Structure formats: C-alpha cells, structure tokens
Image: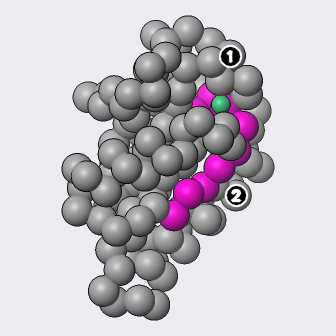
Amino acid sequence: MMNSFRFGTAINCIDGRTQQVVIDHMKQNYNIDGVDMVTFPGADGLFSNGDHSEEIALIRRAVSISIEKHGSRIIAVVGHYDCAGNPVTREHHYMHIRMAMREVSSWNLHAQIIGLYVNDKREIEEIK
Ligand SMILES: [Zn+2]
C-alpha cells in the first residue's frame, strides 16, 4: 500500500469518453490523487433491477479491495449520456445512479458515496 497516494473509487462505464472527466472531477473536488476505476458496460443500469447479481458481486469485490487495501474513502457511481450499455434518458440515468448509490450504501464500506452524470457536453453533473 502506498501511504502517500490518496485513492478514490469509481463504478463507471467502460466508455472511453467517461473516464478522464471523472478522474479530473474527483481529483479537483475530493482531495485525491487518482481513481481505482471499476468498469462494466452501462454500470449504473446494473443496479436498476434484480437480474445482475453476478456483475454486482464482482463490482462489490473490486470496490471492497479499493476501500480496504487502498484506503479509499469515496466511491462515485457514474452514468453518462449516449451510453451503449444502458441506453436510457438522462432522467432514467439519474434514477439508476440513485438506486446504485443506495445499493452501495448498503455495503457499509465507511466511504462517502457520490453520484455523477457525464452529460452531452462531457461535463460532470453531481447528483444529490
Ligand atoms: Zn456507457
């Protein structure tokens, strides 16, 4: 473990348009040096119904390592515009991200949980 490096964690899409903006946003706003990125296609959508328990178990395992071994204290759940893996409206992404935030909260990992939406201008919208 690198004690001086401050890790954050993100549950994000595989989409290459979404990752650097999330890293930059988290570095600028949450006092971290880098992000452990856990990716699945349309990751936010996996939390919207009960058919994805295997993927969610893999995500949970990866996030737990980031928290427990890297000392991350923040987890971002990310959805984005024009997502091939979860092709729904902005409003539905907001709903899915909120559902994912609730699920991740239930893991009791002692980390702050935030929701982020990468919009059509590749800007970050923080979901309250
Ligand atoms: Zn996507």
Q: Residues within 10 Å of mark 2 (few under 14, many from 20)?
A: few
Residue interval drawn in magenta: 36-47
Residue 125, by quadrant, is top left
Nearer-the-camera pick, 20 or 57 = 20
Vertical relation: 79 (above or below) 21: above
In the rendered image, is residue 16 in sight?
yes
- Image coordinates for residue 102, horizontal then vertical, percent: 41, 38
Quadrant of the frame with the C terminus: top left
Position of the N terminus by quadrant = bottom left
Name the spot of residue 14 as percent of width and height, x first: 68, 43
Residue type at numbered disc 2? Leu
**What's the residue type where badge 1 is placed?**
Pro
Task: Tell us which disc is closer to us: 2 or 1.
Answer: 1
Q: Which residue in the protein does label 2 denote? A: 58
Front residue (pair 9, 5): 5
Q: Is residue 103 left or right of residue 72?
A: right
The residue under label 1 is 87
Q: Residue at x 34, y 68 (%)?
A: 33
Going from N to C along the chain, the mark reached first, 2 or 1, is 2
Towards the viewer: 30 or 47: 30
**Colouring mode (rainbow / by chain / secondary structure / one colour):** one colour
Image-quarter location of ligand 1? top right
Using residue 99 as the reference point, say whether residue 43 is left or right of it.
right
